[in-house]
Amino acid sequence: MPFQNQVNQELAYGVPGTFASNNPDASAVPPEGAYVAGTGGCTIAAFGWDQGDGTVLNAPPAGSITYTVTALAVNAGGTGYAVGDTAAFAGGKATVSTIGTGGVVTGVNIQSATAQSTDPTATGVATTTNGSGSGLTLNVTGAGSTAAAGAPTGFVFNDRSAWISDIYDEATMVMPQGYMVDLKTAGDYFAAASTAATAGQKVFASTTDGTLSTGAAGATVEGAIETNFYVTLGGSAGETITISTWSRG
């Protein structure tokens, strides 16, 4: 650790992640025991997400991907079909739209499609019908989508209990993996934002690392999600500000 090379004339306004007032505060209730920092640790004075197992990281848990059928094409037309027949297949239903001689299906439309956990894309998918036709198989195309990230579980409180695991480090804001963390859902706190902050703005949480940014209520901030906190005392980017759930500036 180097020798001290700076002396401040005034005390710091506040320490990010700590209480900014004596107003009531509230913490998220963990599923069992206590929340603990997840794999790789958890940064304090930033927002954290419960990963679903009681561990906390500064990013939402990986979203589950759901698949639906987006396109159908006739693979084998079968025989004996009529326009309007319904052909059910794994993942949805199709309506026969056009036929040729002998009731051979030449075109189908998607009637309905159900969300599923596996990609339904396949060639020659068998069908069952409500009519007298048989032998129709389809080429199915599916697409997946990931559920949008939810709001953070809370603001990771700085109770100054983190420890410096590397003797060569001067300071840290990372709670080591497995150590308890407190996720605050209400209260007044000192914080630092990556953007200039103005009293009355909403606080947004980065879905990559939980860092704070600010913007108008209801705004779309790329890579971030709106929280229930407001800026009560603003400042330039990187400066210590105050955020609150009780006051709106």
Image (cartoon, grey):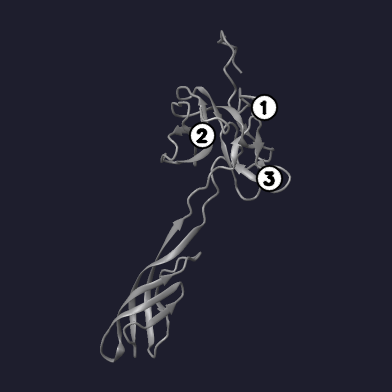
Q: CA distance from mark 2 to mark 3?
A: 22 Å
Q: Residues within 10 Å of mark 1 (few under 14, many from 20)?
A: few
For label 3, the crowd category at 10 Å Cα-Cα, with few meaning under 14, some 14 to 19 and many 20 or more, is: some
Residue at the image position 47 percent from the left and 22 percent from the top? 235
- Residue 213 higher or lower than 113, as above or below: above
Mark in the foreground, 2 or 3: 3
Instruction: Say which quadrant the N terminus sits in.
Output: top right
Residue, disc 1: 160
Q: Earlier in the sequence, mark 2 or mark 3?
A: 3
Does any portion of residue 39 appear in the rendered image?
no
Numbered disc 1: secondary structure: loop
Type of the residue with mark 2: Thr
Residue at the disc numbered 3 = 30
Whole-angstrom CA distance, mark 3 to mark 1, is 20 Å
* Residue furthest to the left: 101
Asked which secondary structure carries label 3, the reply is loop
The disc, 1 or 2, on the residue closer to the chain's N-terminal end is 1
Whether residue 218 sits left or right of residue 79 in the image: it is right
Q: Relative to 113, is 235 above or below?
A: above
What residue is pinned by disc 2? 211
Q: Amino acid at mark 3?
A: Pro
Is residue 248 among the parts visible in the rendering?
yes
Image quadrant in which you'd find residue 93: bottom left
Horizontal and vertical percent position of residue 35: 67, 42
Find out whether the residues at labels 2 and 3 contact each other: C-beta distance under 8 Å: no
Badge 1 amino acid: Arg
Q: Nearer the viewer, residue 163 or 220?
A: 220
Crowding around mark 2 (Cα neighbors within 10 Å: few <14, some 14 to 19, many 20+) is many
